[in-house]
Image (cartoon, rainbow, N blue to C red):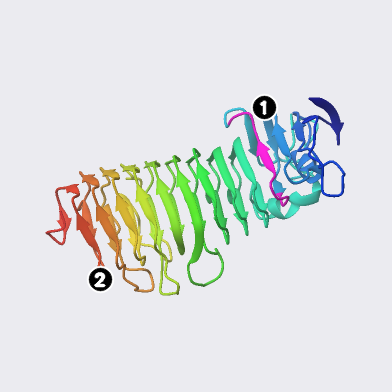
């Protein structure tokens, strides 16, 4: 192994590179180490595709934008590497003030991310990995991605952000694994076709949401106007609603999703009504305007409230009146939910309820 210095950071790289077609050696991927007091954004800006930016323990204040493909941004753990907003008197996208231990941002790349109120932004890049760090206290998103392909977010903690912990739009083939999101003003994890435009559902080509823990947010997980999404082995509790699967009248319709092996319990916090939603409390898994989605082998228990959206598994018309259709609810344990374990409130066509362990359904006969 060879150690060398690139852009002020100590780097360890492979000593042997493959030969290219023209006889020149291919570039070896570099590891760019960021120490407390140094800029994450500077290391990201200096990185080439395939590099890793390793951020040592510390609190790094400011925003970071990643636009380089196949880049890995890695902390040393969500409890030790933390991205947080700048404090008073600190430039939000340059070096921190002298009293700050570290800085996340530099003027290049981070300004738009900071101006939007986001902590870590991935824009227009493929193959990016973000792992083993925390994003906390930002005004809007802790981590935000747009127009990404094959994004992986792994073992990231996103807490106390103003709107969303982790979110993305206009993206395909993403993987969200082993993350924790708590205390965020809207959803802990939010994936959508777009956030500001009307349009049909996006085929995500296999986005996966696995093994995440989403607690104490407004919504645990929101999947909006997407197709081909797998939600497996996640835990959602202490939110106003555990899972919201959202579609509408646009085509293609939202659907073709699979929810398996999730634990969705005691999502009994109270969230007041908004312009689009009635008040929300005690909602386990809500399907609204989606089609051909399967709920199989989930534990959905103790979600209790008096909202129109309350209950264990709730089918509800979309907010443009489009019903759910062709959905399958089978082999789930759905108990102690109120007013019902299974609540079919939109009476769309082709929805089936089979082999579930439950006690109360609305209308009767679904258990």
Q: Nearer the viewer, residue 292 or 132?
A: 292
Say what secondary structure mark 1 lies in: loop
Q: Is residue 330 left or right of residue 116?
A: left
Q: Nearer the viewer, residue 251 or 97?
A: 251
Q: Nearer the viewer, residue 163 or 209?
A: 209
Residue 82 makes an appearance in the image = yes
Q: What is the quadrant of residue 99 in the picture?
A: top right
Q: Are marks 1 and 2 in contact (CB under 8 Å)?
A: no
Question: Against 234, is 241 above or below?
Answer: below
Residue at 53% x, 41% y: name it: 160
Q: CA distance from mark 1 to mark 2?
A: 54 Å
Residue 270 makes an appearance in the image = no
Magenta residues, as a range?
A: 66-77
Considering only order in the chain, which callout, 2 or 1, is on the residue closer to the N terminus? 1
**Residue 350 covered by magenta stretch:** no
Q: Which residue is mark 2?
A: 349
Question: Against 290, is 250 above or below?
Answer: below
Q: Which residue is mark 1?
A: 57
**Residue 71 covered by magenta stretch:** yes
Q: Residue at the left extreme?
A: 365
Q: Position of residue 190 (x, y in %)?
A: 49, 53
């Amino acid at each position: 192994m060879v150690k060398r210095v690139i852009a002020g950071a100590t780097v360890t790289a492979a000593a042997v590179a493959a030969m290219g077609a023209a006889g020149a050696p291919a570039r070896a991927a570099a590891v760019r180490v960021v120490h407390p007091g140094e800029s994450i954004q500077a290391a990201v800006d200096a990185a080439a595709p395939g590099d890793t930016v390793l951020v040592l323990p510390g609190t790094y204040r400011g925003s970071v934008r990643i636009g380089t493909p196949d880049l890995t941004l890695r902390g040393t753990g969500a409890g030790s590497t933390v991205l947080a907003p700048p404090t008073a008197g600190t430039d939000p996208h340059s070096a921190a003030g002298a009293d700050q231990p570290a800085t996340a941002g530099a003027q290049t790349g981070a300004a738009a991310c900071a101006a939007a109120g986001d902590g870590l932004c991935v824009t227009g890049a493929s193959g990016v990995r973000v792992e083993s760090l925390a994003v906390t206290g930002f005004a809007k998103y802790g981590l935000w991605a747009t127009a990404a392909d094959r994004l992986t977010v792994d073992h990231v903690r996103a807490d106390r952000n103003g709107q969303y912990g982790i979110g993305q739009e206009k993206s395909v083939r993403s993987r969200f694994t082993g993350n924790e999101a708590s205390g965020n003003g809207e959803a802990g994890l939010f994936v959508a076709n777009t956030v500001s435009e009307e349009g049909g559902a996006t085929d995500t080509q296999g986005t996966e949401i696995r093994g995440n823990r989403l607690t104490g947010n407004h919504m645990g997980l929101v999947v909006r106007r997407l197709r081909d999404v797998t939600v497996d082995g996640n835990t959602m509790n202490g939110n106003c609603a555990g899972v919201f699967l959202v579609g509408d009248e646009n085509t293609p319709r939202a659907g073709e999703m699979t929810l398996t092996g999730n634990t969705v319990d005691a999502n009994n916090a109270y969230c007041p009504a908004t312009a689009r939603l009635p008040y929300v409390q005690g909602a386990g898994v809500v399907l609204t305007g989606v089609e051909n989605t399967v709920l199989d082998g989930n534990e959905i228990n103790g979600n209790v409230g008096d909202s129109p959206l309350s209950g264990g598994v709730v089918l509800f018309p979309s907010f443009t009146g489009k019903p759910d259709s062709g959905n399958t609810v089978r082999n789930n344990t759905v108990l102690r939910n109120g007013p019902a374990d299974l609540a079919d409130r939109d009476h769309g066509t082709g929805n089936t309820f089979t082999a579930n362990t439950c006690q109360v359904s609305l209308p009767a006969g679904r258990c």
